[in-house]
Image (cartoon, grey):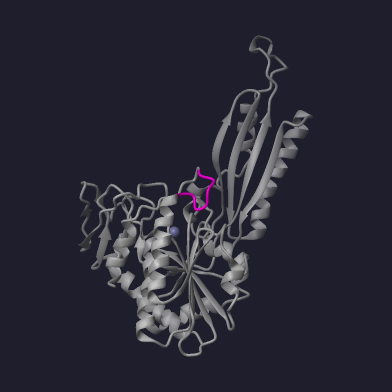
Amino acid sequence: MDIIKRFERYIKIETTSNEFSNTYPSSDKELVLLNLLKDELTEMGLEATYKNGFTYGKLKSDCGKKDTLFLMAHVDTAPDASGKDVNPSIVHFDGSPITLKNGKVLDPKVFPSLEVHKGHDLMVTDGNTLLGADDKAGDALIMDLLERLIERGHYPNIIVAFSPDEEIGRGTEGIDVDFIKKDVEGKLIAYTIDGGQINRFSQENFNAAQAVVELFGTSVHPSIGKGVLVNAQELAVEFHKQLPEFEKPEYSADREPFVLLTGMEGGIEKATLRYILRSFDLSHLAEQKQYFKDIEAKMNEKYNSVRAKVTIRDQYFNMKEIIDKYPDATLIAKEAYKKLGIEFIDDPIRGGTDGAMLSYKGIPCPNLPTGGDNFHGVYEYLDLYEFNQMRELLTKIADLLK
Ligand SMILES: [Zn+2]
């Protein structure tokens, strides 16, 4: 099947994940695509299984290769924009602004990253929904690779996994690492395919924690407040102001860390501040946690009672720690880029990935791109030239396995 047709077939299925749901997958809609992929895998002759939110496919090497290629992509799309009735079109991008069907404009002045796609055909939205290249481009690339390799022959062992709920941070909740590793004899070379521009390979991501700060006031009628009333909201302001002034996302890029106030609520009696802490460097994440502990201690001492309470929880860790010990997937990808003459850029992810989670569950798993960009909104697009280059890159990677 033509990969563009395949991609269009997947993006027509609405699979928005639901952050308010307790079920897994978080939305029944995701099951429609998970089941379709299972049927397609079976049709291709793979051993296909649906298990706890995941569709898996296993293919044994037809030429006695020992190593196994593991590829994973997610089926859900981000709740930030609608994924219903996606109505794409293909336009040739000559460098001038692209007017989408509903009149919105995809403008290189607003999105400077468009520059590298000049001269390519892009698949764009009609301006009302996201496109779903994140991550159905990944789904399509995986299915397309299987189809082509089976037809051509001489392939390694391949295991594929399609995951739910990546966009709401629950992507690897149901993954069965033992099931994946069960029949693996040689090396397990694993990647997620969930990135952007073709050059950008990611083997590094943030270390992440969250902090909740509770402030406790003393409420009395303001008329008799003098020397008695303690306003929890004032305590919250006092607490926040003691954090580093410039270690914030609006001052942070590349490998720089940040602390972000994500929520605040409160009254006189009690106030709560919520933060996320992000750093590529684990020892710096520890320092960030210490900011909170120090301010807590300082304020409680100043007021001579428990006015501030800090609770910190780790969220995810930088996969680089693991990948440095098991660099095979990175080395093979680098080699494949080189063979195709495509520039390889080591691109740290300023967030987390399912591959990062998986790396800490025992499968070192860097991330490959898809050729898509501007994810999670109506300006999302897929560069079809890069999408095609990705097909070649995946073939090269598969061929490099022993
Ligand atoms: Zn994604």
**The N terminus lies in quadrant:** bottom left
Residue positioned most to the bottom: 63
Residue at image position (43%, 64%) is: 195
Looking at the picture, how far across and down is residue 10, in whole percent? Answer: 34, 61
Q: Is residue 214 above or below residue 258?
A: above
25 in the magenta segment: yes
Tell me if 331 is positioned left or right of 117 in this view: right
Question: Is 46 placed left or right of 354 in the picture?
Answer: left
361 to 213, vertically: above or below: below
Name the spot of residue 181 as percent of width and height, x first. Answer: 59, 74
| Residue 129 vs residue 373, the one in the foreground | 129
Q: For the point 53% across and 60% down, which residue is it?
A: 255
Instruction: Answer with the quadrant where ligand 1 appears in the image.
Output: bottom left
Q: Is residue 392 visible?
A: yes
Classify residue 360 as left or right of residue 385. Answer: right
The kind of secondary structure the magenta stretch mainly shows is loop
Q: Which x, y percent locates residue 78?
A: 42, 51
Magenta region:
21-27
Q: Residue at x 67, y 31 (%)?
A: 215
Q: Nearer the viewer, residue 81 or 259?
A: 81
From this view, report whether residue 314 is shown above or below residue 146.
Answer: above
Which image quadrant for residue 180? bottom right
Q: Position of residue 368 (x, y in %)?
A: 45, 69
| Residue that appears at 45% across and 87% down | 62
Q: Quadrant of residue 281?
A: bottom right
Whether residue 138 is visible to the viewer of this picture, yes or no, is no
Among the 4 quarters of the image, the one containing residue 344: bottom left
- Judging depth in this view, the residue of 155 and 322 nearest the camera is 155
Where 198 falls versus 85 (above or below)? below
In front of the other: 382 or 96: 382
Q: Magenta segment: does it hold 8?
A: no
